[in-house]
Image: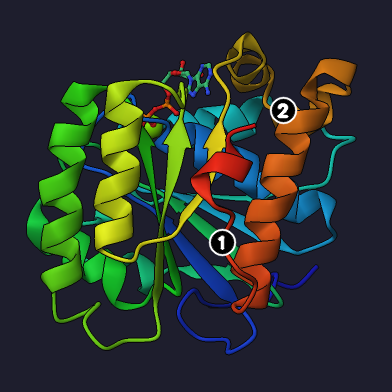
Amino acid sequence: MGKPRTMRASKDQNTQRILVLNAKGGCGKTTVATNLACQFANEGHDTALIDYDPQCSSTEWLEMRPSHLPAIHSISAHHNHRTTSVWHLRVPQGTTRIVVDTPARLADMSAVKLVREADTILIPVIASSIDIRAAIPFIEKLLKSPELRGSSKRIAVIGNRSRKNSKSYKSLVSFLQTHNIPFLTSLRATQNYVRAAEEGVGIQELALKSTQIDIEHWQSLARWIESGSAPASTPESASR
Ligand SMILES: Nc1ncnc2c1ncn2[C@@H]1O[C@H](COP(=O)(O)OP(=O)(O)O)[C@@H](O)[C@H]1O
Ligand SMILES: [Mg+2]
């Protein structure tokens, strides 16, 4: 058998490159990356998940993935991040969705390299005052970077474990409104994310009645990424 055909991650015009980024640990980067990859794979996209984090959580999650579920191509990239841009890595020919999971405390230079060729940057933020205080300067810095200014890249925030009546949640909403950053959706705090993480599946694949609302969040997130023009949900409607 010949070698499988591959292409550069940055190459194909029809490929959507989604970078999941936030300097803070534990905010939900791996949760967003793995569940979004599942969403795409279940919608029939040829999907690759690039793990840039030395902790390898996404890679380990993929190793547990049951073989009867839609395949997600795994690329563990942390070992060459100093020498190679993640976008120079090779993915299977025909890959249409590439999701990149990143580590916490990513150095500014590495973040810039990653942002350069991403189409969409998703920033999960936990709506606690500590996390929001950390997220605001991070997002401000990102917005000022030449890679983002005036580019067609899209950046959006995903609230995680949000309680919409909390003071910190409201301050996150108002910060995002001031900067005209879409607040795409708010993920509920549910043990189903922990369970899915332990089983190598997405929350969509647990096939539980109780996850219907969560499934809708992932569907609307994928729609926003795909359409480019669909309006972002308001935080109020997203956090039902
Ligand atoms: N909405 C959520 N509800 C419940 N648990 C969550 C939720 N989001 C993340 N978690 C759990 O919190 C932990 C940290 O999330 P993770 O996605 O690994 O963060 P990061 O990759 O940013 O460090 C994991 O155990 C994950 O399963
Ligand atoms: Mg992680």
User: Which one is closest to the eye, mark 1 or mark 2?
Assistant: 1
- What amino acid does circle 1 point to? Ala
Q: Say which residue appears at 25% left-offset and 60% top-offset.
A: 178
Local crowd at mark 2 within 10 Å, few (<14), some, or many (≥20)? many
Q: Quick one: SS at disc 2?
A: helix
Q: In the figure, 9 relative to 130: above or below?
A: below
Crowd tier of the residue under label 1, counting other residues whose Cα lies within 10 Å: few below 14, some 14–19, many 20 or above: some
- Judge left or right: residue 83 versus residue 37: left
In the picture, residue 203 is in which quadrant?
top right
Q: Point out the image quarter for the N terminus.
A: bottom right
How far from the left and from the top, in percent, is residue 90? 50, 70
x 68%, y 42%: residue:
217
Mark 1 to mark 2 CA distance (whole Å): 22 Å
Quadrant position of the C terminus in the picture: top right
Residue type, label 2:
Ile
Residue 203 marker: 2
Its colouring scheme is rainbow
**Front residue (pair 77, 139):** 139
Judged from the image, the quadrant occupied by ligand 1 is top left
Q: Which residue is drawn at 55% across and 41% down?
A: 236
Instruction: Kindly identify the residue that appears in the image at 40 percent across and 85 percent down.
Output: 152
Disc assigned to residue 164: none
Q: Earlier in the sequence, mark 1 or mark 2?
A: 2
What residue does disc 1 label?
A: 232
